[in-house]
């Protein structure tokens, strides 16, 4: 009868202890999870902020260095602000040379250019034309599309005069400064010899300045206007080509005969050039020889005999 209450009390005590342990474990786990949950958002908030700061810094650096690098690349690239003097040569074949020359002249005038020198005949025509440099390619395209004739030969050339232009501009600036200094000395001159000497120096430096200005204008004109040399011939005219190499005996014999004739002609020209001088020298020598012979033929004069007494 006493055993049953004891067992009941023990069972109740064990149940209370188990309940207390379970409550303590649940409190500990909830505290740890709360702490972790509180720390995780803080770290998450800090990490994106740092990442965004680093990303923004790198992005700002890239944005800052990108345009500078591109600008440096453009400045160092060839062809930037270059001064080019362009020329072109063109040979056309046409059935009507005069009409082709008129067509060429009309195209150049329409492009804003002008004709510098012309020589036109029924067989050939030679024209020296000047067009704006920015329209050179368009004019050449119109002249070579078949409207003025068939293209036989074509060539272009571009000379870089950038360094010459910069050098001339620098020398002009220096010369003007020097001229201003000399003119200031002229204003302070007192004696006549000093004034004359300074005026002579001013004149010399003004002449050098005018020469530099004229050279700058020529360079600017060659850059602004391009020259086209056009040669128009009849379409049935043969195209001049380089002769083929011929190593046969007859060709060698012909070359030797031509060389012999050339050498013989040269010798004859030398003889013809020296013949008048040789004739004059022969005449002078003949006169001198005759005089010497006459002098030798005359007997010597007899010595004077002293008188006696």
Image (cartoon, grey):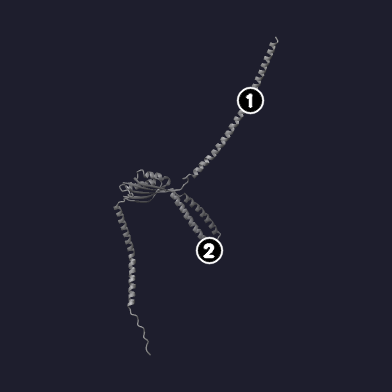
Q: Quadrant of the N terminus?
A: top right
Could you say which is closer to the camera, residue 87 or residue 139? 87
Could you say which is closer to the camera, residue 302 or residue 162? 302
Residue found at the far left of this picture: 250
Quarter of image, res 47: top right
> Are there few (<14), some (14-19), or many (20+) residues within 10 Å of tag 2?
few
Label 1–label 2 contact, CB within 8 A: no
Q: Position of residue 87 (x, y in %)?
A: 41, 48
Quarter of image, res 54: top right
Quarter of image, res 24: top right
Q: Quadrant of the C terminus?
A: bottom left
Q: Position of residue 84 (x, y in %)?
A: 44, 48
Q: Position of residue 293 (x, y in %)?
A: 33, 75
Residue at x 31%, y 56% (from the top left corner):
256
Q: Position of residue 248 (x, y in %)?
A: 30, 51
Q: Is residue 100 left or right of residue 221?
A: left
Which comes sooner in the sequence, label 1 or label 2?
A: 1
User: Can you say whether 234 is above or below 19 in the image?
Assistant: below
In the rendered image, which residue does mark 2 sit on? 193
In the rendered image, which residue does mark 1 sit on? 32
Quick one: SS at disc 1?
helix
Could you say which is closer to the camera, residue 104 or residue 243? 243
> Are there few (<14), some (14-19), or many (20+) residues within 10 Å of tag 1?
few
Residue found at the far top of this picture: 1
Q: Is residue 182 left or right of residue 222?
A: right
């Amino acid at each position: 009868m006493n055993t049953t209450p004891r067992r009941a009390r023990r069972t109740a005590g064990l149940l209370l202890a188990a309940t207390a342990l379970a409550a303590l474990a649940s409190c500990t786990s909830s505290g740890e999870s709360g702490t972790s949950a509180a720390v995780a958002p803080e770290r998450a908030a800090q990490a994106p902020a740092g990442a965004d700061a680093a990303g923004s810094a790198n992005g700002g650096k890239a944005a800052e260095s990108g345009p500078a690098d591109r600008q440096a690349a453009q400045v160092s690239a060839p062809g930037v602000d270059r001064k080019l003097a362009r020329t072109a040569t063109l040979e056309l074949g046409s059935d009507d040379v005069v009409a082709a020359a008129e067509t060429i002249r009309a195209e150049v005038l329409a492009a804003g250019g002008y004709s510098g020198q012309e020589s036109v005949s029924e067989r050939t025509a030679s024209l020296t034309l000047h067009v704006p440099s920015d329209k050179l390619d368009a004019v050449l395209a119109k002249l070579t599309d078949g409207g003025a004739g068939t293209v036989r030969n074509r060539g272009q050339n571009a000379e870089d005069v950038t360094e010459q232009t910069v050098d001339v501009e620098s020398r002009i600036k220096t010369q003007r400064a020097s001229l201003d200094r000399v003119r200031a000395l002229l204003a302070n001159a007192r004696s006549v010899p000093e004034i004359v000497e300074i005026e002579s120096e001013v004149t010399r430096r003004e002449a050098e300045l005018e020469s530099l200005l004229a050279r700058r204008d020529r360079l600017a004109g060659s850059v602004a206007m391009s020259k086209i040399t056009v040669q128009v011939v009849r379409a049935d005219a043969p195209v001049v080509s380089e002769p083929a190499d011929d190593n046969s005996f007859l060709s060698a014999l012909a070359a030797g005969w031509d060389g012999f004739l050339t050498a013989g002609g040269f010798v004859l020209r030398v003889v013809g050039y020296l013949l008048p001088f040789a004739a004059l020298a022969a005449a002078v020598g003949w006169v001198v020889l005759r005089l010497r012979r006459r002098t030798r033929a005359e007997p010597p004069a007899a010595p004077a005999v002293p008188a006696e007494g």
